[in-house]
Amino acid sequence: MLSKTIDPTNIPSHVAIIMDGNGRWAKAQGEDRLYGHSNGVASVRETLKAARELGVKYLTLYAFSTENWARPKSEIEGLMQLLVASIHNELDSLCENGVRLVTIGEIEKLPQDCIESLNEAKDKTKNHKEITLILALNYSSRDEIIRACNRLAEQVLQGNIAPGEIQQRHLEEALDTAHVPDPELLIRTSGEYRVSNFLLWQLAYAEMHFTKVFWPEFRKQHFIEAIADFQSRERRFGKTSEQLT
Ligand code: IPE
Ligand code: IPE
Ligand code: MG
């Protein structure tokens, strides 16, 4: 059942989430940081279900940033193990629910078992059409843009694009998010108000929803609150309010 507060004709087709606050949530429980990350998996499961039920077509989750390599080795190893275990546990459910899994970021630099699990899950889900789950792993937006620039430079060198003729669409097609519409809504949990190198190009006109809820406590009701907040905004894209009516 959809919440009464939601207009089913105005659901964002792409929602991106910075899943933050696992460590602080765990600390508040007197537990270690990995306990927070483990508990965040249930939030992912529930958010994916809520998004699918509401008709969201793309859900992007920031799971590991390029900057997160600076964390303690034990936390990184725990996160990578959790990734492999979660894919293993959730793959059947992704298949039953028509979820296509894709990734953005340089996954080639993740541990080998992560790469293999991700590739297997991507391959098994590649024809699914209900919703696309995009995991941002070893992702940083500046890094993505630089990699895209290098691809474009290569195309110019090969004579496919003339120098001086690079258009927005060329860059868009060279980003990891090629063929994915820009997110209309960004959610960040845990009361932090920053984008932390996430989808800098793609968020140009996204609505931003910030909640103080820590990621391990994020549930369907919070996702619905974010959608309701999105629906309360007037998206003007540079025009005046009067021009929109
Ligand atoms: C988000 O939670 C998960 C990752 C960045 C991997 P954090 O681990 O950043 O939790 P806090 O921000 O320290 O509470
Ligand atoms: C952003 O969270 C990255 C992910 C959610 C994976 P961080 O916790 O790493 O961001 P900062 O360091 O607080 O900006
Ligand atoms: Mg954090």
Image (cartoon, rainbow, N blue to C red):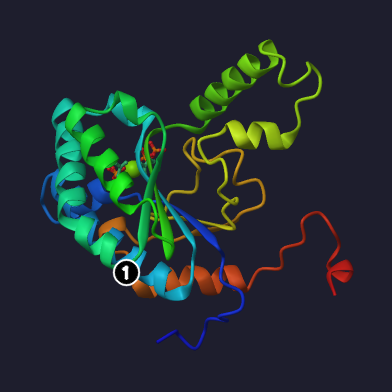
Residue closest to the eye, 30 or 131 = 131
Horizontal arrangement in the rendering, residue 169 relative to residue 212 (left or right): right
Residue closest to the eye, 118 or 69 = 118
Res. 215 image quadrant: bottom left
**Considering only vertical position in the picture, is 190 above or below 56?**
above
Q: Amino acid at mark 1?
A: Arg
Res. 168 image quadrant: top right
User: Which residue occupies 78% across, 16% down?
Assistant: 163
Res. 42 image quadrant: bottom left
Could you tell me residue 9's position as x and y percent? 61, 78
User: Which residue occupies 17% across, 51% down?
Assistant: 38
Q: Quadrant of ligand 2?
A: top left
| Mark 1 element type | loop
Horizontal arrangement in the rendering, residue 49 relative to residue 22 (left or right): right
Could you tell me residue 217's position as x and y percent? 27, 64
Residue farthest toward the top in the current orientation of the protein:
157
User: Which residue occupies 23% across, 46% down?
Assistant: 23
Label 1: how many Cα within 10 Å (few below 14, some 14–19, many 20+)? some
**Considering only vertical position in the picture, is 125 above or below 114?**
below
Horizontal arrangement in the rendering, residue 164 relative to residue 217 (left or right): right
Horizontal arrangement in the rendering, residue 215 relative to residue 13 (left or right): left
User: Which residue occupies 20% across, 39% down?
Assistant: 79
Quadrant for the C terminus in the image: bottom right
Task: Kindly identify which residue carries mark 1.
Answer: 219
Could you tell me residue 184's position as x and y percent? 59, 58
Residue farthest toward the left in the current orientation of the protein:
31
Q: Is residue 48 visible?
A: yes
Q: Is residue 27 visible?
A: no
